[in-house]
Image (cartoon, rainbow, N blue to C red):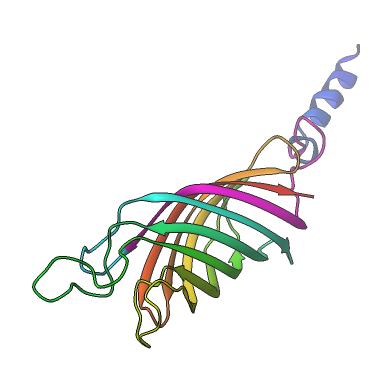
Amino acid sequence: MKKSQLAAALALLSSPALAATPPEGVAFEPRRGFYTDTNIGVFFTVGGENAYSNAQTYLQLGIGYDLTERLSLGAHFGLGSSAQNCFAGYLPGTETCALSDNFTMSFLDVSAAYHVRLMNRLYLTPKVVAGYTRLDPAPVDPDEHDPGSAVSAPNAGVGVGLEYATGMDHFTVGADLLARYVIGPNITAFAFFPKVKYTF
């Protein structure tokens, strides 16, 4: 090979256009669109006579859609339990809760998340949520209904998470921390959960 041909070949290999091309030949772009996610983690409430509840299992299932590369909307059903935390106050002269200090909290929420790119494949996802909560049995009973009945109330909250787009097409993994306030019963709940997201 002539020296002039060798020099031309080396110049081509060192060109910026070629250097910017990944080994696969196609720049990575996270998949966006309709998605589902499954989340299992821990759940607890704060406040009440006991300050905080015992940690319990939390399950959340959701669907959503990426409106843009940065903005996503979703709908989720979550289920957790508050264990050993009294919100109705103690009976006079005792440390016995006036109502149940163990109750289930079911959440049906919509959410909006904003994706902030930290590095290739890794995103920070602050979010806001709002929806409805069912508490069964009622931990508070302001209207003096049947103490064993369930009550429902609106909720609102904020959260933050991390998402990593894996090398497996369609799959994203991550973790979320979510805080919600149930309006009326005045109960604050926290959930922390790893997540697996599948984008179609």
Q: Residue at horizontal 35%, vertical 71%?
A: 139
Q: Residue 190, relative to residue 13: is it above or below?
A: below
In the rendered image, residue 153, in percent from the top left (x then y), is placed at: 48, 79
**Residue 180 among those drawn in magenta:** no
| Magenta residues (range) | 20-45
Label total for image: 0
Q: Is residue 80 left or right of residue 172?
A: left
Q: Residue at horizontal 52%, vertical 47%?
A: 40
- Identify which residue, 20 or 89, lies in the foreground: 89
Q: Residue 49, relative to residue 177: is it above or below?
A: below
In the rendered image, residue 126, in percent from the top left (x then y), is placed at: 52, 63
Q: Which residue lies furthest to the top in this view?
A: 1
Q: Residue at horizontal 69%, vertical 35%?
A: 167
Q: In this view, does 186 lie to the left or right of 31?
A: left
Note whether residue 32 is visible: yes
- Identify which residue, 23 or 110, lies in the foreground: 110
Q: Residue 7, relative to residue 90: is it above or below?
A: above
Q: Residue at horizontal 74%, vertical 40%?
A: 20
Location of the N terminus by quadrant is: top right
**Residue 44 among those drawn in magenta:** yes
